[in-house]
Image (cartoon, coloured by chain):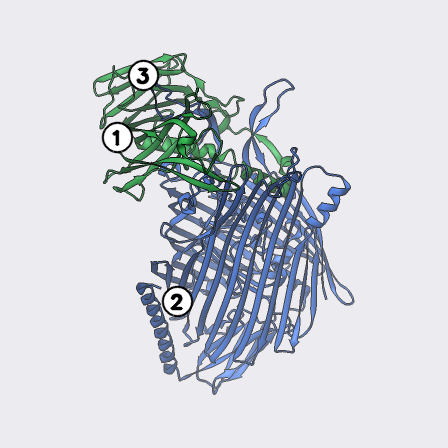
Amino acid sequence: MTGVASDNVIVMCRVTILFLFLGFTFRLLAQSHFSVSGYVVEQSSREALAGVSVYMPGTTLGTTTNAYGYYSLTIPARDSVSLTFSFVGYQSITYLIPLHRNVLHNIALATNSTDLAEVVVTASGDQKRVSDNAQMSQIGIPVQQIKNLPALMGEKDAIKIIQLMPGVQKGSEGSTSLYVRGGGPDQNLLILDDAVVYNGQHLFGFFSVFNGNALKSVELIKGGFPARYGGRLSSVVEMNMKEGDKQKLHVEGSVGVLSSTVTVEGPLQKEKASFLVAARRTYLDAFAQPLAKVFKTEGFVPDYYFYDLNAKLNYHFGQRNKLYISGYLGRDEYQNQEPETSGRILSAGLNWGNAAATLRWNHLFSERFFTNTSLIISDYRFTISQEDRNPESTTPQAVFKLSYNSAIRDITLKHDADFYLSPKHMVRFGIKSTYHRFTPDAIVIRDIAGGLAKQDAEPIDVVESGVYLEDAWRPESRWRINGGLRLSHYLYRNRHFLKPEPRLSVAYLVQPDLSVKASYAVMNQYIHLLSNTGTGFPTDLWVPTTKQINPQHSWQAAMGIAKDFTEQDLALTVEGYYKTMENIISYREGASFLRLNTLQSPDKANWEDNVTAGRGWSYGTEVLLQKKTGRLSGWIGYTLSWTQWQFAALNGGRPFFPKYDRRHDGSVVALYAINPRITASATWVYGTGNALTVPVGRYSAYAHKGYVSTEPGKVTVTPFDGGSHTIDYTRKNSFRGEAYHRLDVGLQFRKQKKNFERTWELNVYNAYNHRNPFFYALGTKTVGPKQTPLTALYKYSVFPIMPSISYRFRI
Amino acid sequence: MRRLQLLCLLLSAITGCSRLQQEVAPDELVNQPEKLIVVCFISPQDTLLTAKVTLTRPILSSDNKSTEVTKATVKIAEGSRSVTLAYDAKNKYYKANARQFAIEAGKTYQITVTTPDGKKAESTCMVPQPVTVARVQFDSLTTNVTNANKRYYVQLRWQDPAGQKNYYRTTGLFRYVSRQNTSVIALQPVSFEGAYNMQALVTDNGLNGKILESGRGYLDTGGTLLPANDTFSKLYREATVTVSLLHTDVNYYQYHEAVQRQDATDGNPFAEPVLVTTNIQYGIGCFGAYNRSVVMLKLR
């Protein structure tokens, strides 16, 4: 480590010590107060409940439980205190608690007894009223809701529900990419139990890796980021896995058209230890091969499957210490073989996957000082391989063989502290450091005919760190403030960055149920995604900041109002934002992840040479009207936004609309409980068409021949070559594809059997069979038997109407 | 091509998307007028001024070659001087003898093209100063795949003028008489590394004012691999190479670079479309300039 870099580490350590010191000082000042603290769990499973409101009725004093279900409320000394615990979908409880000293008060909340509780919808992980929270641009997705809304092939997907929220655009049809407030799919921090997930996609982006059965909570933040989050510009998607029932063993499963899942959870030691294992696998491959044999299908037979496995184990050593171990393993495997007419066999393979393991330790230093320490190891890799073999050849070697690998391995150490300083201040601080090892593109290639052999794999090691201090402050009854500072640090060889990231979110309650909010956040991103498919292929390449590539930087300001209509149980948020993004990177025009064109050279061609940096800006307005509870629940979302990019090397340096700039984007989501056993659901989405570059003409581009021939007494001049077939395009992305719209409907039939509950579910994706464009491409069009074929532009769609049926059970 | 094959296989496997294709004809595509294409490169060393004038075809036509324009008026001017280029039907370009109109470094030239049906395109460019070749290295390397093979190459070095952005292209012609066939004088363009269609383009990006080096320019003899144990003189009875360093303007560089990049994407629907840079007003194409330095080497 260089001298300058180690200095920075020292600075960061000092800042941490300062935070600790400040914390303890404040603690001494607060002796005239007592605290009530404890864990809130779900009554039957003893699963920790995050986001439960804990408040003194009739006052503004209150807090919410953290991700581990812990709360602490510091109250001026008095005889007793009345505290209410409330959480949507659970029965509220009010306790009268004597307060002569610090009180420990663990509680369990029971679900609402009616079956309708199952269909309760809420759009905030923090169950307080939207008007009462300093945080804006935050949306929580209850896992139950993910299970109740219709889905493509019945595969329940948290990411696809997030795509239905205003401010979030999806990529192309069916894709699980997220484009949040004009940001790219790499600008989202996807966290599963503290572990960063890189390419959270299965089946070429059509499904996300997050298994709904194993998830406890999903939360999206798209602006006004609290200082505890950093490393990405545009959003945070934090997911937590269930801990596993501490009372009873459960088996839950589903059988769908694409995959089956099974989840087993239960106690290992009652009240102390529990486990959860969730597995999912597709069976396309199991059917494809035998069917191909039966029907004697000529040509290639794709062999594809994906699986994922989630496991979690936790042990409670008592009130003060808890240990969690969680792991994730997911892989996609694709193989295909195609016999060619020459007798050779062309085989191709593509596989990729994430593996992550997290060890977390919760420790309570005191009732008001909660800490968590995490050790996280994650690994992402993908391999693409191709082989051209001649089985009749005498030489056993392949004629052509290529294997292309890309990988990232992270080791992270993270420490976070929640300090419940006083009734008015809740302070968080922490430190995080990640050691990344990137292998952006390692190619092993052998081409017997071309006499070519190539092998290169140079890993890049970098260290990314951050330290933060955050204060949730209520200066008086009408103000809610969350302010903080994050210092991010990055080290690559002798290049390093230390960047401050101020964060501020403020809410002012104009009326008890109406608040005006504003936020400001500076973000830096040191790792980038190079994508030239835009479809979420695993071939998208994660690359670090290096000598040539600078960190991405953005600031975002947002303003809005939040209004609760308590009687109708409606919540309305209207937000406007402006965001700038610097040093965003893109492939140069025509560049691609596989640089086979340059492989003729025995020298290493660098991926950095294929990259160009630019800037972007985005602004827009988002409206979200939600109905959280009742027989009819759901939301209406609408976004009006503009996003523009400007790259020196793209579009001649002029600004242009990126592909996923979407002027209008809307969604209507509804769930209706027909009776306690039958639930109907529907979602309708609309989005302006993608900004595309389309061909408008064709011509021969004549190039200069360049060389001179100096035959004695004769100079041959052939100034131009034969002219390469060239396409004349519109200006970059100046053509708008067709608007995207789609209706999905679902019906669920639940029944309590003797020993288990079962649910039959019918889903229809794209119910009115709208041919949404996936991409446009030129093709040939046959006009008559003896006429020259013409060129035509074709629109390609992926999913027509897709009905599906699935079955779920829970024992 | 292999890459494209793979992507298509992957995609069709998942979706069977051929069944979900629909012909569309948006106005933006169908109602595009033909554009005038002008391609002209000028240099102080050339003995002939040449320009190619053609028209684009509608995208939905069956022909992918430009339409030749034979009756245009093509004029190159500098200050009050000008020359009109006449159409040469045999070579299909407009030409004028350079003795009629000298091209000089540092001067700005204007091209104007008008067609009888009223289309007009124009552009200007400035001729760069010469940059001389400092050194040409002749060497060989052995590749080791199945058998050891030897490849001979030349590599150019030159001093980049500081304080300005510079663009270059290296070219060469290998002229040889082999020992096996002594009756034929063979000519083969030098194939520069990283080059596409012999268009080895170089910039001083990040190396302004430094010594620049070209990629290796291989002296290939039509695809046959040379055994590693033979010496050069055992293979060739006589051999010369004429290498040029073209100090080009930005227009020349960007046009050639974009054209070759677009060609390399090969219709891959997933690659970002390559927009060919143009400096032609009211049309497309390139009016570019270069200054050539030539070195001839006898090889043995």
Element type at mark 1: loop
Circle 1: residue type: Pro
Q: Secondary structure at mark 3?
A: loop
Q: Is residue B253 left or right of residue A401?
A: left
Q: Where A582 falls versus B163 (above or below)?
A: below
Q: Counting residues from the N terminus, which is met first, the one under dot 2 or under dot 3? A: 2
Chain letter, disc 1 residue: B
Question: Which chain did the image draw in green?
Answer: B
Chain of the residue under label 3: A
Foreground pick, A711 / A272: A711
In the rendered structure, which amino acid carries the disc numbered 3?
Gly
Residue type at numbered disc 2: Tyr
Judging by the rendered image, the residue that carries numbered circle 3 is: A713
A242 is higher (above) or lower (below) than B238: below
Residue hosting label 2 = A468
Question: Is the residue marked by circle 1 packed among few (<14), some (14-19), or many (20+) residues within 10 Å?
Answer: many
For the question of whether residue A629 can be seen, the reply is no
Mark 1 vs mark 3, CA separation in Å: 28 Å
Q: Colour of chain A?
A: blue
- Residue at 49% over, 80% down: A36
Residue highlighted by disc 1 = B128
